[in-house]
Image (cartoon, rainbow, N blue to C red):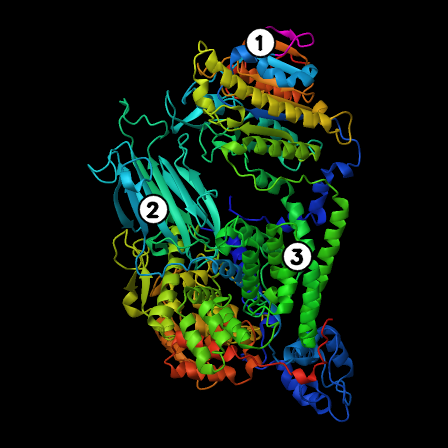
Amino acid sequence: MIVPGMIPRRALLRRLGIGSAVLPFLGNLPSLAASAPAARQRLVVVFSPDGVVKKNFWPSEPGSFADRDLPPILGPFAPFKDRLLTLKGIDNNVLGDGDGHMRGMGCLLTGIELFPGNIQGGSDTPAGWASGISIDQEIRNHLQAFPATETRFGSLEFGVLVPHKADTWTRMVYAGPNKPVAPIDDPYQMFAKLYGSMKDRESVRSVLDEVREDLARITATLPAEDRRILEEHATLVRSLERNLADQRAAVAHPVPVLEQGVVEQNDQMPRISRIQIELLVSALAADFTRIATLQYTNSVGQPHMKWLGVDEGQHELSHEPNSNAAAQEKPTKINTWYAEEIAHLAKRLADTPEPGGDGSLLDHTTILWTNELGEGNSHSRDDIPWVLIGGGLGFATGRAVEFPGVPHNRFLLALAHAMGHTGLVRFGNPDHCGEGPLTGLA
Amino acid sequence: MPTPHRILIAFSVLAAVVVGGSGFGPAAEDPATEHPATEHPGAAIYREHCVRCHGPGGLGTANHPDPLVGDRSISQLAASIDETMPEEDPTLVTGEAARQVADYIHRSFYSAVARDRHRPARVELSRLTVRQHRHTLADIVGSFRDEPPAADAARGLTGEYFKTGRFDRNKGLVFERIDPTVAFDFGTSGPEEGRFEPTRFAIRWTGGIVPTETGVHEFVIRTEHAAKLSLNGGRKEPAVIDAVVKSGTDTDYRGSVFLLGGRHYPLVLEFWKANQGVDKHDAPSATPPTPASIRLLWKPPHGVVETVPARVLLPREPPRVFVLATPFPPDDRSIGYDRGTSVSPEWFEATTAAAIETADHVLRHVDRLAGVGRDAADREARLRSFAATFAERAFRQPLSDDLQALVVDRAFADAPDLDTALRRSLLAVLASPRFLFRESGDNDAFATAARLSFGLWDSIPDGPLWEAAARGDLATAEQVRGQAERMVQDRRTRAKVRDFLFSWLRVDLGPELATDSAHHPEFTPEVAADLRTSLELFLDDAVWTNGDFRNLFTADELPINGRLAPLYGATLPAEADFTRVRLDDGRRGGLLSHPYLMSVLSYPASTSPIHRGVFLARSVLGNTLRPPQEAIAPVPPEQQPDLTTRERVALQTSAFACQTCHTMINPLGFALEEFDEIGRYRTAEPVADGPRAIDASGSYRPREGPPATFHGGRELGAYVAGSRDAQEAFVQAVFHALVKQPVRAWGGDTLEGLRRSFAASGFEIRRLLVDIMVVAAMPPRHDVASLPAPERSP
């Protein structure tokens, strides 16, 4: 049942972190980790739209990156060459209703057809939502089923300038058939989700002095018979105050400080991106989640990256033919900008020590950068971009690999297996699962 | 056919419910107004053997000055009396007599509970009840929004019909009209032949909805196409139902929302028979147009899934209402009405969560509520002023400088930013005892105003009432009466009175009706829900249209719809909405024989004259009944197949111990025997050897005056309508429901005075509400002189 604004029964406990409900919450805080946890694994899927410029994106041949330069779009990953893995040749083969952008988005992480529906694309038949769960949610549900890997949120869905319109082009994550999950692209909303209860605690604590003072004043003016109920009330206030003070001492978690007043506008995209990355890194550090997605705009996304000197919208630029070499320059710039943001995320993870473990967060996290199309102008869903950075999945990195003609369902299966969900035999449309999880990654 | 075993279980459960739930217990007794059916058998023994030394009421005498009070149990007392009392000859009171006198002493004055009952009634400092908490917060926040449009007679939603896939009134609007309900099947053509393309049109319905029940309401949109329902939320907030993207073959879309009964909520329902995204409408299509239909249904609490009826829909859109969703523990109802005379950790937690939820809502909408832009130069000043007004409304008192400093200035002085400052101020206000407790401030004109508004609305004073208090125009009874007469017209009074009546009839929590009974397959959940609606409409009409208390018991017309008609002997078209019908040749006694109550007060396969009699004796006629001396599982009809229900009940309760109360209960319940277990009129009851004529003769011995006899529902209703006992019971029940303090606190003769003026007014219920508030707005004050001098905190 969905009741807007409804606070569940134990809301106060949860929101204020009082009583037994506080234990799982505190348990997630690194400062209180009682025993060394099993090595954590994290997966962060980053989406950017409209395909890539293939010649500027893919390494010219498979093999180690050690003794060569990266292609222009991947240039920002130079500091992370040894942790970089590119996978070429993995295709999204899902057919059915919906145009290329819709299927590119809706089937990207689900590997299964869209339902028929009322969303009409530029071609093909109209379609609705995906008919299955997405791999991030599948892994999330698996992790949440075990106390050792259960986290406060299970997964977090970040967005950057996702249009406020729920349709097949704007939703990549699915909790199940017909159950799209909306990314949160307002950093303040995400902050409230992550730290709202702490803020509530702080706010309540801050007014209790006034409440006690006022109670004393009123009590003094009342006849003795009426004082009893106010004295009982005062006892309740005092015990809340004690509880909150205890919590405050225990929950010494660094809450990120947000730049205020950033509004959701095209020109603010770089600032929003950086705030979301900060929140993502701190959520991972606090072990609020081990699965996250970060979705830049949407399938057919139209950001105007004026800060790069690109005034046109990204989607319209992506339609320029390969033969127009000059026109490929702008999409290359745009995609390089996304790479810079992801490299920044990688750097922030690399700079953050793994709480209670060895190395950095990046050693235990894999960033997976992908796209709804392999190429913008042809709307091809062959050679979907899959760029991995970091050590979360235990794949062999520092190299480019090619798997010509492999359906992407097999790669999605490999992600699940690498995250410990080894019981998953098929995912999405079984016809695309071939011989099971893609091998040759580790 | 249920097995006898199953029936036995049902019987004992019901018996337990009656004992525990309908106020038989000692806690429900109210000595000043109790009218025991007969004297306690121990009282006579006490008079004969004990009073000489212990004095009347155990107060003691010159030779035995110690009052007879203590903490021994009844059996301990009995043992002691058996052995030792009376002192001159302990053999005089022994065994059963000792037990009876011990029981009498204990219940009357010996135990702590009994002593507590004898304390003089007073107005107690009380916290807000849950209902008051929710309505108060709705009105505080709502006071910063527009007033809802005045409700006129128009019902239904405003429908705008577009020939395009978007709601562009300039380009696509074909027509606008008021639709009583949303239940359309457009086939493959469209809303109107020739004016719409069959493959593309859109409709938007806007207006308001006024539910009567409080609780979670489930809504259902049933359509083959795309639709969206927004209810009491802004356009940017998640819709209750979002099926804008048509996906797959589902046709039912569900969503739930918690609503407070009696308030107006904005509602927008959008429907599209059109693809979204890229416009390919003009491209030739090989597929023929598909059918289109849409229906808006709901399942209110205690109801069934049905088309949202026109009577709850309004064509104009009101402003949104802040509905507190935080769950609260239920209030104490042990003495018959909700009251807030105790606090608990659960309640305290709920109030804190409620404060946070309210502050969240206000902060989300602060620009509009405070009427100030994000970048306004005077934003701080405006927010401070907003916070002060909020505090004043929450405290129901003008804000003194001291208080302003405490709950507003401090927050703004310390906080890092304005939003945090406002949040702290709101939390300080909502956690303050001045908000949470009533009667905690000075006894001035504003206190009078708050008593009026809480009495009639369970909420804060509105603008005109506040201004009257500020002008000093609440000093005289006439001025208070003027305000009460204005306020009684408000929809909030209607909602409160509706909730009172349902609670008075003990159906507010939605009794489980045995609608799955094999005995009455025709008594479906839909019929049960319709009967509840019928009762609702009957009461609304009786109070607000007819207005005469006596009519509650004498009306022979009931609201009946097409579904109920065949069951209750009326002739109506199957689809007919509720309309007043005179049933059974006028043999009904208004409320008392309403089929909903008759069904609630029955077993699945037979009536229950005991339940009906207890309801009449207690709720309607105001008698105190003690619980049965031992739990008795009534004998199921199968074991005595030759007896009528009346005969069976008479037999079962014939024991001397039962007769104390059942001489009152049974003859009242028997008068309703002509209405069967689903409330149909009957002249005969089937028993093993064939149908037996119904004996609906009954009687009642009032507290004063001669005993009365009557026969059947109509005569019973006529008797109750003229009964002083019933009038007094009703006045007291209304007083307690409105004021939530014992009427005795206003003096022993207040109740009778109110009853007399009620009678003098021709038993006008509206007048009674006003009279009660005129009395209760001026409270009896505590004896301040006897108190220690108040210690002011430094």
Name the residue carrying label 3. Answer: B413
**Residue B432 x/y as whole percent:** 63, 63
Q: Is residue B419 visible?
A: yes
Q: Which residues are magenta?
A: A59-70
Q: Is residue B768 visible?
A: no
Prevailing SS of the magenta stretch? loop
- Quadrant that contains the C terminus of chain B: bottom right
Query: In the displayed structure, does residue B271 sit left or right of residue B387?
Result: left
Question: On screen, A394 above or below B218?
Answer: above
Cα separation between marks 2 and 1: 54 Å
In which chain is the residue bearing label 3? B
**Quadrant of the rendered structure where residue A287 is?**
top right
**Residue A337 x/y as whole percent:** 57, 22
Cα separation between marks 3 and 2: 47 Å
Query: Which three-letter amino acid code belongs to the residue tagged 3?
Result: Ala
Q: Which numbered marker is on residue A263?
A: none
Q: Are marks 2 and 1 in contact (CB under 8 Å)?
A: no
Mark positioned earlier in the residue sequence (3 or 2): 2
In which chain is the residue bearing label 1? A
**Residue B639 x/y as whole percent:** 49, 59
Q: Which numbered marker is on residue A403?
A: 1
**Could you classify mark 2 by the number of other residues whose Cα lies within 10 Å: few (under 14), some (14-19), or many (20 or more)?**
many
| Residue at screen point 66% across, 53% down | B415
| Residue at screen point 41% across, 64% down | B491
Name the residue carrying label 2. Answer: B205
**Dot 2: element:** strand
Residue toward you, B318 or B665: B318
Question: On screen, B500 above or below B721?
Answer: above
Residue closest to the far left: B194
- Mark 1 and mark 3 on one chain: no
Query: Which three-letter amino acid code belongs to the residue tagged 2?
Result: Trp
